[in-house]
């Protein structure tokens, strides 16, 4: 994790430094604002690591501004495209417009700068479950529809989407639609 974070922070610094040269003016000449969601979340943690590294490297204050839900995306979508307001976000950024009406378009209103982190998803089962392989888990879920659950950190996150993709790819039917039940 630490090596990945260091690489992400260095890459972000180089990207922002390169964008300053492209502007043909002194950059940054005012504080940079990183807007993100979820105080204490992974995106908040990464935003704070990047802000600390960038503040020291650029000699300009970089602040983290935590906002709720899609408010962060709306703030950045409406900000001038000058590099002083950036968004650090996760998978919810792409999922939110599919589920709800938003005041931004994730494709038209944003330009990706860097992939800052990667987080693997791991499939685990309780040792008491009679499945010792993925094939056995699929067979068990099909034999007992609606009786097995999967957990994730929240709707629209990578673990939730991976669970839904697992269900769709394996043909495991959900007994109760719109829930995280096999």
Image (cartoon, grey):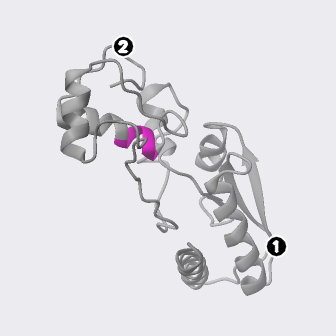
**SS for dot 2:** loop
Q: Is residue 118 visible?
A: yes
**SS for dot 1:** loop
Q: Is residue 28 visible?
A: no
Residue drawn at (43%, 41%), measured in percent from left and top? 126
Q: Residues within 10 Å of mark 1 (few under 14, many from 20)?
A: some
**Labels 2 & 1 near each other (Cβ < 8 A):** no
Residue drawn at (58%, 82%), measured in percent from left and top? 10
Give the residue pinned by disc 1.
61
Q: Report x, y in % for residue 31.
A: 80, 69
Q: Report x, y in % for residue 104.
A: 52, 38
Which comes sooner in the sequence, label 2 or label 1? 1
The magenta stretch is: 158-162
Residue drawn at (32%, 25%), measured in percent from left and top? 182
Give the residue pinned by disc 2.
176
Q: Report x, y in % for residue 120.
A: 42, 59
Q: Residues within 10 Å of mark 2 (few under 14, many from 20)?
A: few
- The residue most toward the top is 176
Answer left or right for 176 relative to 71: left
Distance Cα–Cα, label 2 vs label 1: 49 Å
* Circle on res. 3: none
């Amino acid at each position: 994790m630490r090596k990945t974070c260091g690489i992400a922070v260095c890459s972000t610094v180089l990207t922002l430094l390169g964008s300053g040269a492209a502007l043909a003016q002194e950059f940054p000449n005012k504080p940079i604002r990183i807007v993100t969601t979820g105080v204490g979340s992974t995106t908040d943690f990464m935003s704070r690591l990047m802000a600390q590294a960038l503040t020291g490297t650029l000699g300009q204050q970089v602040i983290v501004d935590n906002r709720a839900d899609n408010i962060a995306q709306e703030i950045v979508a409406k900000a001038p495209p000058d590099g002083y307001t950036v968004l650090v976000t996760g998978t919810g950024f792409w999922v939110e417009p599919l589920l709800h009406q938003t005041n931004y378009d994730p494709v038209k209103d944003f330009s990706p700068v860097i992939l800052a982190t990667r987080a693997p998803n791991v499939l685990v089962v309780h040792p008491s479950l009679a499945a010792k392989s993925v094939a056995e888990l699929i067979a068990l879920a099909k034999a007992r529809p609606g009786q097995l659950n999967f957990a994730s950190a929240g709707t629209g996150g990578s673990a939730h989407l991976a669970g839904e993709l697992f269900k769709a790819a394996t043909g495991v039917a959900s007994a109760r639609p719109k829930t995280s039940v096999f």
